[in-house]
Image: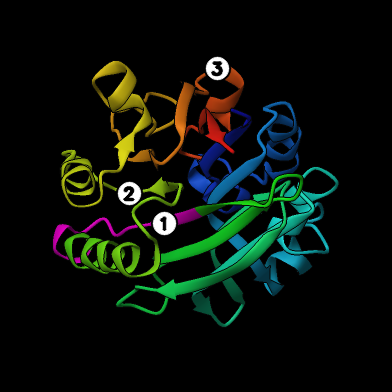
C-alpha cells in the first residue's frame, strides 16, 4: 500500500518580535523556518497588516507576514483575521506546499482585540487526490473562555469531519493542566504527538526557559513517525514560544 510522508510545524511567532517586543526578528524567523523542511506550517499571532509598523520599522515587510514567511517555500496559504484594531489585524495562518481544496475561519473571540480562532482548511495531495484536514487554533488564557472555545472546536470537528478522515490539529492551546488533551482524546479520538510518544507534552513557553506545555500537535487518521521540540539556542531568541514539529505518514 502506498503512503505519503509529510512534516508539520506549529509556532506562535509573537507577531514577528522577540520577547518583550524589543526588536523585529521576522527575517531571522523566516531563515530558520526554511531549514525545518516543514510541508505544512501552522502559525499563531501573525500579522496580516499593521500600518504603523510599516511606517516606523525599517525592515517591516511590504507584504503580510504570512506572505513574507511563505515566500517561495509554501505557495499556498490561508489566513484567519480575528484580532482587529485601528492599525491593522493579526490572527492565525496555515502555509502549505500542497494546494487548499477550501478553507474557512471561525472567530471564537469574545473580545475584538483577542486573537482566538479556528482556522480550518483541507489540503490536497495532487499526485494522489487524497485530502487532509488541517486546523490551526489559538485558545484563550482564561479557563472559562477556553472551555467555551473548546466546546465550539469539538462541535465543529464532529459536524464537519467524518470519523475516518485524517486530521491534524495544531496551535497554541494555552492549556496549563492538560485538560484539552483528555477531552480531545475521549470525544474525538485525537492523539497528541508528544503525549503519545513520551507520555507528556513538550514544554514550549517561555522560549528562553520553557516551563509550560501550551503548544500542541494532535492527529487522527495518520501514522506518527516522529516529533521534536525545536529548542536549540537560536530558537530561544525568537518569539516567546518554541516551535513544535512532527512527521506523519498518510496511507493512500
Please report the residue visible at 55 percent of the width from the left and 62 percent of the height from the top.
121
Quadrant in the picture for the N terminus? top right
CA distance separating discs 3 and 1:
25 Å
- Mark 3 element type: loop
Mark 2 and mark 1 lie on one chain; the one further toward the N terminus is 1
Tell me residue 182's x, y (percent). 16, 42
| Residue 64 image offset from top left, x and y in percent | 73, 63
Say whether residue 115 is left or right of residue 122: left
Q: Position of residue 240 (x, y in %)?
A: 47, 39
**Disc 2 element:** loop
Residue pointed to by mark 2? 173
User: Picture quarter containing residue 161?
Assistant: bottom left
Q: Are marks 2 and 1 in contact (CB under 8 Å)?
A: yes
- Left or right placement of residue 79 versus residue 108 in this view: right
Q: Residues within 10 Å of mark 3 (few under 14, many from 20)?
A: few
| Labels 2 and 3: the sequence-earlier one | 2
Q: Which residue is mark 1?
A: 137
Q: Residue furthest bottom?
A: 86
In front: label 3 or label 1: 1
Amino acid at each position: 500500500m502506498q503512503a505519503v510522508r509529510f512534516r508539520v510545524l506549529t509556532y506562535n511567532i509573537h507577531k514577528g518580535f522577540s520577547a518583550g517586543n524589543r526588536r523585529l526578528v521576522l527575517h531571522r524567523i523566516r531563515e530558520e523556518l526554511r531549514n525545518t523542511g516543514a510541508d505544512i506550517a501552522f502559525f499563531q499571532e501573525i500579522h496580516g497588516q499593521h500600518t504603523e509598523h510599516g511606517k516606523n520599522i525599517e525592515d517591516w515587510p511590504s507584504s503580510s507576514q504570512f506572505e513574507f514567511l511563505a515566500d517561495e517555500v509554501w505557495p499556498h496559504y490561508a489566513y484567519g483575521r480575528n484580532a482587529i484594531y485601528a492599525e491593522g489585524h493579526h490572527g492565525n495562518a496555515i502555509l502549505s506546499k500542497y494546494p487548499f481544496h477550501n478553507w474557512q475561519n471561525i472567530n471564537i473571540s469574545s473580545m475584538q482585540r483577542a486573537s482566538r480562532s479556528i482556522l480550518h482548511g483541507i489540503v490536497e495531495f495532487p499526485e494522489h487526490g487524497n485530502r487532509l484536514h488541517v486546523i490551526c487554533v489559538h485558545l484563550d488564557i482564561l479557563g472559562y473562555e477556553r472551555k467555551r472555545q473548546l466546546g465550539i472546536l469539538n462541535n465543529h470537528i464532529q459536524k464537519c469531519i467524518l470519523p475516518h478522515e485524517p486530521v491534524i490539529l495544531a496551535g497554541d492551546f494555552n492549556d496549563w493542566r492538560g485538560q484539552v488533551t483528555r477531552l480531545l482524546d475521549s470525544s474525538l479520538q485525537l492523539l497528541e504527538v508528544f503525549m503519545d510518544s513520551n507520555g507528556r507534552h513538550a514544554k514550549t513557553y517561555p522560549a528562553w526557559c520553557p516551563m509550560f506545555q501550551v503548544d500542541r500537535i494532535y492527529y487522527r487518521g495518520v501514522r506518527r513517525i516522529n516529533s521534536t521540540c525545536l529548542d536549540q539556542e537560536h530558537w530561544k531568541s525568537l518569539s516567546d514560544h518554541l516551535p513544535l514539529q512532527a512527521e506523519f505518514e498518510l496511507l493512500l
